[in-house]
Image (cartoon, helix red, strand yellow):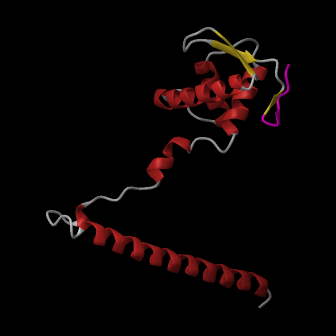
Amino acid sequence: MTNTHVISALRLRRAEISGNIHDLEKRMTRASGRISQTWMPRSSCFRLAQIPMLSTQARLSAHRYFAHNELSRLTQYALRTASGPLTSAEIATTVMQAKGMPSGDAARKEIVAERVLTVLRRLRKHGAVAKHGTRRDARRRMGASASVRGCECILT
């Protein structure tokens, strides 16, 4: 066999995954035991099996669109390349186009616009973005500060 290093690496990875599965099963058994000890003496009117599971993916769904700091970078890029001040909806449209998201999805656009507003508030706090107006349709442009938490912003 000429690829012994590949087989060796695969065996090692298999052993590592098996160990992780074993550890998770132990944690699951302990957690299940704690739940049973807590619930059983207090209420006998319903079964634990009737309680539906809560997926951890449900909590992460709001953050699945962008990687760490990606939205901030895309927002700053949209402001730098714009010919004038932009609203949060215009920035959201630009960000969605840059990510390849469908621009016709109104629900997703609203989510992105809300997250863009959060980024814009943080950038304004650090002096990187200037706001013109007081309502949601206020326009923003790049501010005088060129540095935001170590991220160099190129002003044009």
Identified at 69% across, 40% down, the residue is: 69
Can residue 94 be seen in this snapshot?
no
Q: Pick the residue in front: 21 or 103.
A: 21
Q: Position of residue 130 (x, y in %)?
A: 72, 15
Identified at 66% across, 78% down, the residue is: 13
Quarter holding residue 77: top right
Q: Position of residue 11 (x, y in %)?
A: 66, 84
Q: Is residue 102 left or right of residue 145?
A: left
Q: Is residue 63 left or right of residue 7?
A: left
Does the magenta stretch mainly form a helix, a strand or a loop? loop
> Which quarter of the rendered picture does the C terminus lie within?
top right
Q: Position of residue 151 (x, y in %)?
A: 81, 35
Residue lying furthest bottom: 1
Identified at 56% across, 81% down, the residue is: 18
Q: Position of residue 100 (x, y in %)?
A: 63, 36
> Which quarter of the rendered picture does the N terminus lie within?
bottom right
Magenta extent: 149-156
Quarter holding residue 103: top right
Quarter holding residue 101: top right
Identified at 26% across, 66% down, the residue is: 39
